[in-house]
Image (cartoon, grey):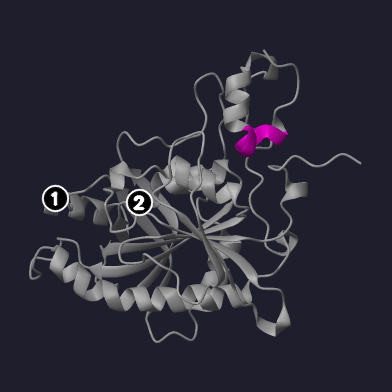
Amino acid sequence: MSTPHPASPQARTTIVLGVIGGSGLYAMPGLERVEKRVVKTPFGDPSGPLTIGELPRAGGSPALKTVFVARHGEGHVLLPGEINARANIHALKQLGCTHVLSVSAVGSLQEEIAPGDVVLPRQLIDRTKGRPSTFFGDGVVAHVQFGHPIDDGLASLLAKALENEQVRVHDDKTMIVMEGPAFSTRAESNLYRSWGADIIGMTALPEAKLVREAEMAYAVLATSTDYDCWREDEAEVSVDAVLAVLHANVRVAQRVVTTLAQLMPTQEASLPYPRALEHAIMTAPHFISAERRAQLDLICGHQLSGTQT
């Protein structure tokens, strides 16, 4: 019996949770059997060493393997546009992740979403510029479905994990992802409000696109830190104001990740990730070079059959 390709669904049946920590979330307390690992990828270096450990599940089920990466690097040294998202996502998949939770600090674009509230976006609007947003190109063309960028199964489980937290939760919201690092102008902030956006951040894209291409499920736990700059009676957002709310939000995020782990099933069949690459690759296999095949093997090697060039 042949061994299934490591990128194939047959080889990825056990759920492994990846956690990408945003501003303020640089570590994941509660992890057991912890080890740090430096991971190399064909797309460069991740933001830093990845932390691998286990979080307990409820009911005596086997512990959940969890992999954590600090998005901005240890010490917060990377601007949003400097993050090597391709390397971060590839590293998570190397370590077996099937589901990815992004923890992000965001600004509120709506009155009812106050600083300290938690938001679960289900839709994203991309306003980033110049960030590599695909593993493909350079001789390999693929178009994945992205109409629903957030995985509903994982997001719904995340909502359940928040039920006992003493915070206001806003589900099914729309998130603008801007380039940064500067915050919005007031005109931009009001423009995004007119589009129906609820929150604004700087990092969920291209993350979500890359996670989809890597055939992992993606959800965002967004914590509101400020009202951006659209409110006439509110001081413009500042780093000091953000940090004051951020520390309390981080503690909430850490507890929610621990609760989410208790709720997660052990087998992927009970919480499937998107099979995004089925029928997505348009390039004829015999036109794909051996070099690109090797670079993309962990992403789509199970979909590339036929004669190599």
Q: Which stretch is magenta?
A: 297-302
Q: Secondary structure at mark 2?
A: loop
Residue in the image at 76% along x and 20% along y:
306
Decide which of 49, 8 is in the foreground and name it: 49
Disc 2 residue type (three-letter): Thr
Snapshot quadrant of residue 107? bottom left
Structural distance between the alpha carbons of marks 2 and 1: 21 Å
In terms of sequence position, does the residue under pointer 2 or pointer 1 come before the other? 1
Decide which of 99, 143 is in the foreground and name it: 99
Horizontal and vertical percent for residue 33?
58, 70
Q: Quick check: can you spot residue 230?
A: yes
Image quadrant occupied by the C terminus: top right
The residue at which mark 2 appears reads as 203
Residue 298 inside the magenta-drawn segment: yes
The residue at which mark 1 appears reads as 187
Residue in the image at 56% along x and 24% along y:
141
- Above or below, 147 against 56 in this view is above
